[in-house]
């Protein structure tokens, strides 16, 4: 029986992970859950999965949880609560489905405890990739991607030697604005941007998919996960999201992983890797879908993609700066403070103005992150209205 | 340095194999060549690759070869010549690129010598699959497919456990008559049937692609190569021939192998397996191709596919009977004696009238083969004009 610690249990990935664990209740047991703000859902999950410990971020909900479970469960809270949870509750696998830079410390803590980390938190690698690779190279833990794209790549590689890889190609749905004329981007509303054509996901990542920032982050993740320079990483737009990514080998052969858009498969694969466990459900039929389309991404319409590649190539704390700026920008866009096109403006501005240093410790990364968050919005807005 | 014995060296696959061996002349050396009728090309190949031995089938050409190389090379000839060649010339890998049932005996001989057989000769498995699986299960030799479809499957499997496979899907271009209305099939001329939309191949296999008989044979091969019942083998029509085949696993994930239509890749992979050697050349770009299409095969328009599946399910000598009938029918069609639709008629007729027996020896298989060839055309024609 493998013990699973799940961070971000009430989100979209977290809930899929719990479905998966419930299906394999003879192999996996939840030892701890961590959630941010959905108190009712966390309570429901506590009842269903009887963890030893929980973390909850929101102050009001926390009191409810404490009153109800204070006697039976270890309850973690506060800014260091996630890290304490990971350090005190033993597990075999930690699923990190947190959203945002807050996911980095728990990833590092779990790796240092030599756990398998099933990573859905993109920011861990986007901002902490250099440091995490250092830990992995020193024999700390194991990192298995949960993103459908990186899971696809892992499945295509299936133990192939690194020297036989020529390139890795991530597919991108292109988001809801793939065919929108250039001039209409500044008028995009949050409601329009929250309608993703193929995947049902949380708000932050749905906006990141609409700007293609998400794909840029995934390139940075792929760079770290598969140890490949940016010159050998590519993006193909593929609106149907059926081919989840591809690996090109040095003999010209390409392997691709395909499936219906459903996160339960990559989550389950991260748990079962390198084996595969059975999963029932609807199967992909290409004759039913009839046609798969592909195009090069349009870097002019989607400058966030270019900003990410530039940040990745620059290295050090540059991706952390872009990520922090993007988190602030997406929040501001969703609350109606800035236009859709300002997201690209702010992130590019952050990269231009950030002086990167090597990202070789948590402190350095978090300092860069904090400094950007503090004043990026104000300084961008004051500069752009000047 | 690995010694390679190449059967069918002057055909399309044989020539590609030689290109590949020339590129890796520090890893592979040709020890023997066998060809059927193209004397000038064989002489050219002898000059380029300096084999120790050759086999040549055609009587006139054989005299030329003997006069020219009788002193320097071992020369094999006659009905048992191919088998003798395989039994007397040591090699590490035998590439069997012969066309037709004549390929079975050399495959069996090489396996009995515990060689790796890179198999492009479909008939070995179509008619001798049961017997070959018996040999392999007894530890004789190793069989690596060269067909682009089966090579794709091998690449997708890459060591995955058999129990995790849910189904195998072969793609079919659909041939030149995919969109031809039903009523026009009987008027198809050999010239029309010899124009394959995506692959440049020999005449026999091009006709088999036009009738989809080729895909039916490939299902029988896949059944034997990957030990899967016919209920778990499928065909998807895919006109662009870019996805060469797919494997569906029991968690719903599908892996596919993609590439430009070029036989050098699967030939090289059969030589390098399980490694991959580099190969230069044009790379596949899906954005350049733009769209991949898929459809279910139309069993009414292409009854040969159904006949093959039925023959495969019947087992024993039934596939040998269908194969022999098809060889006779294709020959008769190419020489203008029968209509295109008679190919399907003759093969279905052969299956209906054949009394299958277990295919557990070469003698039994060859007896079935001979009996069908002897009178299938006459008895079909006399029955159909009755």
Image: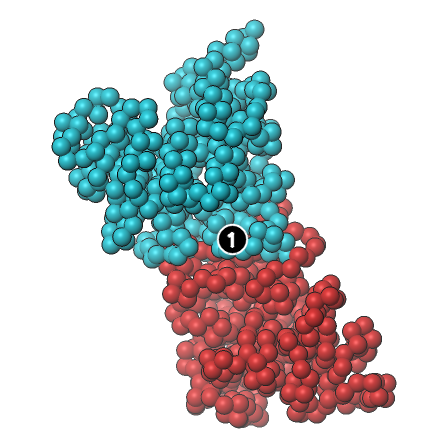
Chain colours: A red, B cyan
Q: Quadrant of the C terminus of chain B?
A: top right
Q: Would residue A38 be seen by someone viewing this image from the given angle?
A: no
In front of the other: B56 or A221: B56
Q: Position of residue B377 (x, y in %)?
A: 47, 14
Q: Position of residue A312 (x, y in %)?
A: 45, 78
Check the image and name the residue furthest to the right. A68
In front of the other: A62 or A302: A62
In front of the other: B292 or B32: B32
Q: Would residue A229 be seen by someone viewing this image from the given angle?
A: yes
State whether residue B330 is above or below residue B236. above
Check the image and name the residue furthest to the top. B386
Mark 1, Cα crowd under 10 Å, few <14 / some 14-19 / many 20+, is many
Residue B331 is drawn in which quadrant? top left
Instruction: Write the residue at 41% across / 59% down.
Output: A249
Q: Position of residue B96 (x, y in %)?
A: 36, 38
Residue B140 is drawn in which quadrant? top left
Q: Chain of mark 1?
A: B
| Label 1 secondary element | helix
Instruction: Write the residue at 79% across / 81% down.
Output: A39
Numbered-mark total = 1
The answer to whether residue A342 is left or right of residue B16 is right
Q: Which residue is mark 1?
A: B157
Q: Position of residue A9 (x, y in %)?
A: 71, 76
Instruction: Write the residue at 33% across / 24% down.
Output: B79
The answer to whether residue B130 is left or right of residue B92 is right
Instruction: Write the residue at 47% across / 13% down.
Output: B375
């Amino acid at each position: 029986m493998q013990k699973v610690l799940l961070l971000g249990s009430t989100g979209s990935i977290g809930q899929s992970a719990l479905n998966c664990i419930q299906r394999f209740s003879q192999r996996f047991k939840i030892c701890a859950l961590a959630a941010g703000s959905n108190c009712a859902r966390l309570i429901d999950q506590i009842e269903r999965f009887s963890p030893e410990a929980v973390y909850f971020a929101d102050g009001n909900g926390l009191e409810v949880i404490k009153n109800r479970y204070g006697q039976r469960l270890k309850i973690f809270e506060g800014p260091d609560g996630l890290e304490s949870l990971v350090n005190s509750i033993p597990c075999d696998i930690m699923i990190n489905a947190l959203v945002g830079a807050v996911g980095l410390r728990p990833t590092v803590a779990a790796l240092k405890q030599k756990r398998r980390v099933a990573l859905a938190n993109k920011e861990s690698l986007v901002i902490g990739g250099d440091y995490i690779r250092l830990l992995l190279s020193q024999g700390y833990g194991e990192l298995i991607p949960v993103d459908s794209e990186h899971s696809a790549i892992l499945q295509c590689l299936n133990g192939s030697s690194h020297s036989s890889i020529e390139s890795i190609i991530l597919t991108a749905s292109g988001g809801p604005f793939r065919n929108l004329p250039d001039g209409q981007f500044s008028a995009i509303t949050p409601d329009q941007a929250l309608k993703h054509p193929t995947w049902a996901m949380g708000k932050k990542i749905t906006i990141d998919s609409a700007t293609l920032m998400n794909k840029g982050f995934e390139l940075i993740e792929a760079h770290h996960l598969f140890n490949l320079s940016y010159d050998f990483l590519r993006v193909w737009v593929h609106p149907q999201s059926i081919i989840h990514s591809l690996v090109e080998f040095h003999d010209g052969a390409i392997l691709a992983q395909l499936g219906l858009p459903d996160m339960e498969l990559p989550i389950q694969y991260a748990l079962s890797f390198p084996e595969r466990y059975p999963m029932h459900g609807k199967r992909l039929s290409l004759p039913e879908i009839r046609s798969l389309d592909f195009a090069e991404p349009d870097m002019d319409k989607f400058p966030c993609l270019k900003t990410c590649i530039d940040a990745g190539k620059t290295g050090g704390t540059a991706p952390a700066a872009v990520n922090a700026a993007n988190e602030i920008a997406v929040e501001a866009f969703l609350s109606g403070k800035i236009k859709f096109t300002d997201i690209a403006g702010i992130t590019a501005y952050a990269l231009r103005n950030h002086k990167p240093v090597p990202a070789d410790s948590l402190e350095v990364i978090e300092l860069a992150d904090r400094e950007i968050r503090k004043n990026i919005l104000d300084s961008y807005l004051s500069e752009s209205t000047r």
